[in-house]
Image (cartoon, grey):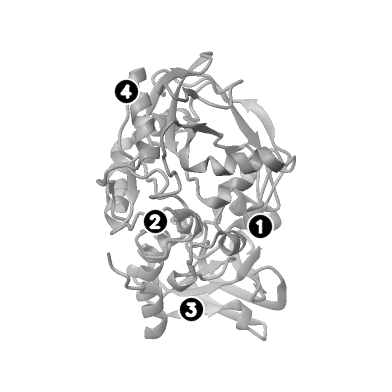
């Protein structure tokens, strides 16, 4: 249970880290590679290239927050660590999109559940789109390398009551269950994974690949918004970026130009096409920002006869399922299981389709009360019942025939999303 702060140590040792809020004049910098985004993709790319001896510049719109800033305070953390202060939604306001906006990206605020892409999905991509380099046998060494780098393994600690209830339900229904792998080292079980890990137990990009890149002379600009990639003839020549003030939102008026031989755009499934659209990058097939899919997640909360304290221990900690194959409804029912309080008897919700889904116990920290669809005394009674609540979230495989959410990205912001159906799944794909 080490409290060693890699970021504080690195800054003291002279890492090349620039807070764009401190810049007072326009400037230009050059490198072999500019990596836009510091999350899972950007961090991994930057570390590999820096270790190979290339000069690397990392660009992050969010600010650098680390152990000293992670105080388990939802009010300040949501505003600072998430896109649009945790208020990013689709244009119609129907779906919330929780995305990190800080160094480390969403790996800084996620719940540490870490899965390999299923073989069925990889084979589907290869068979349908010709992506043979993504076959399971080709990806296995990459998965193994990431699991080692981020200390990914099934969580060995006993589950809390909130987690264990899902195991009990699975066993009563005859569903398969397994312990979720997590990218942690010396987890303190505090339960505030979503607001930044105060003990550095979470092995996201912030504590692994970003320090690894900076140790090998990479340079990090944070609080710097990538505005536009500029092409010269048939290649990208430079990136124009805007410095943000200390509030992380207001442009300071300072412009930074970054030149490189290569540019890596790793700014998320929303940020990346947004940047490419703003840059008027050639798009001969008119696919930029199109067919952007959200992974629908249904939330369910039940009041149990016993005390569960769902706000203790990390969300999805030692959770009893990574793949539940069951006949459940994701079409009309908001919940995939219903629990009868006082009897602990579990039964499936109305069965309308067969799907492969992944269900995990959900976080129930105090901020979750904002999601309750009630007011006044009803809200008060519900919050008072929180110690006996059991929460669960469920997502399903995108290769199933069930409805999903498809839409487009417009200049980096969520566009007009619509409900649609995916093409039929190939046989055996889940």
Q: Position of residue 401 (x, y in %)?
A: 53, 20
Going from N to C along the chain, the mark reached first, 4 or 3, is 3
Q: Which residue is mark 4?
A: 171
Q: Secondary structure at mark 3?
A: strand
Q: CA distance from mark 1 to mark 3?
A: 24 Å
Q: Which residue is mark 2?
A: 190
Which quarter of the figure has residue 211?
bottom left
Query: Which residue is at a point 39% across and 45% down the rendered structure image?
Result: 113
Q: Secondary structure at mark 2?
A: loop
Which disc is residue 84 wearing? 1
Q: CA distance from mark 3 to mark 2?
A: 30 Å
Asked whether the beta carbons under mark 3 and mark 2 sit within 8 Å of each other, the answer is no
Q: CA distance from mark 4 to mark 1?
A: 41 Å
Q: CA distance from mark 2 to mark 4?
A: 28 Å
Query: Which residue is at a point 34% across and 48% down the rendered structure image?
Result: 182
Disc 3: CA contacts within 10 A as few (<14), some (14-19) or many (>=20): some
- The residue positioned farthest toward the left in the image shown: 156
Which quarter of the figure has residue 181?
top left
Choose between 405 and 173: the one closer to the eye: 173
Q: Is residue 295 left or right of residue 257?
A: left
Q: Position of residue 42 (x, y in %)?
A: 47, 59
Asked whether the beta carbons under mark 1 and mark 3 sit within 8 Å of each other, the answer is no
Q: Nearer the viewer, mark 4 or mark 1?
A: 4
**In the rendered image of this protein, does residue 279 appear above or below residue 396?**
below
Q: Which residue is mark 3?
A: 17
Q: Position of residue 132 (x, y in %)?
A: 38, 36
Q: Nearer the viewer, mark 3 or mark 2?
A: 2
Q: Is residue 51 visible?
A: yes
């Amino acid at each position: 249970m080490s409290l060693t702060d890699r970021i504080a140590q690195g800054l003291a040792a002279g890492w090349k880290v620039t807070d764009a809020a401190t810049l007072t004049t326009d400037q230009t910098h050059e490198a072999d590679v500019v990596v836009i985004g510091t999350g899972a993709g950007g961090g991994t790319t930057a570390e590999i290239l820096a270790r190979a001896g290339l000069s690397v510049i990392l660009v992050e719109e969010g600010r650098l927050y680390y152990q000293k800033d992670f105080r388990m305070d939802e009010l300040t953390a949501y505003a600072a660590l998430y896109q649009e202060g945790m208020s990013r939604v689709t244009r119609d306001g129907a779906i919330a999109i929780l995305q990190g906006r800080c160094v480390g990206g969403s790996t800084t605020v996620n719940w540490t559940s870490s899965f390999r892409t299923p073989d069925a999905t990889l084979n589907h991509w290869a068979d349908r789109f010709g992506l043979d380099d993504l076959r399971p046998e080709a990806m296995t060494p990459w998965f193994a390398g990431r699991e080692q780098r981020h200390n990914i393994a099934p969580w060995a600690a006993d589950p809390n009551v909130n987690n264990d209830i899902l195991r009990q339900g699975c066993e009563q229904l005859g569903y398969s269950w397994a312990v979720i792998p997590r990218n942690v080292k010396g987890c303190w079980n505090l339960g505030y994974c979503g607001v930044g890990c105060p003990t550095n137990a979470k092995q996201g990009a912030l504590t692994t690949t970003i320090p690894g890149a900076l140790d090998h002379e990479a340079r990090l600009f944070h609080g710097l918004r990538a505005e536009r990639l500029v092409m010269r003839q048939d290649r990208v020549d430079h990136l124009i970026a805007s410095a943000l003030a200390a509030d992380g939102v207001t442009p300071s008026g300072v412009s930074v130009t970054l030149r490189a031989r290569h540019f890596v755009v790793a700014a998320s499934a929303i940020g990346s096409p947004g940047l490419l659209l703003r840059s008027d990058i050639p798009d001969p097939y008119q696919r930029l920002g199109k067919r952007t899919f959200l992974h629908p997640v249904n939330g369910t909360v039940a009041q149990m006869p016993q005390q569960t304290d769902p706000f203790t221990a990390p969300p999805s900690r030692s959770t009893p399922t990574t793949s539940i194959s069951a006949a459940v409804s994701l079409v009309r029912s908001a919940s995939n299981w219903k629990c009868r309080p006082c009897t602990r008897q579990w039964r499936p919700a109305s069965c309308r389709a067969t799907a492969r889904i992944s269900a995990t116990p959900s976080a129930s920290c105090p901020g979750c009360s904002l999601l309750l669809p009630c007011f006044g005394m009803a809200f008060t009674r519900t919050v008072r019942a929180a110690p006996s609540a059991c929460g669960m979230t469920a997502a399903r495989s995108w290769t199933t025939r069930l409805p999903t959410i498809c839409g487009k990205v417009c200049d980096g912001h969520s566009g007009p999303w619509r409900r649609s159906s995916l093409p039929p799944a190939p046989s055996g794909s889940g």
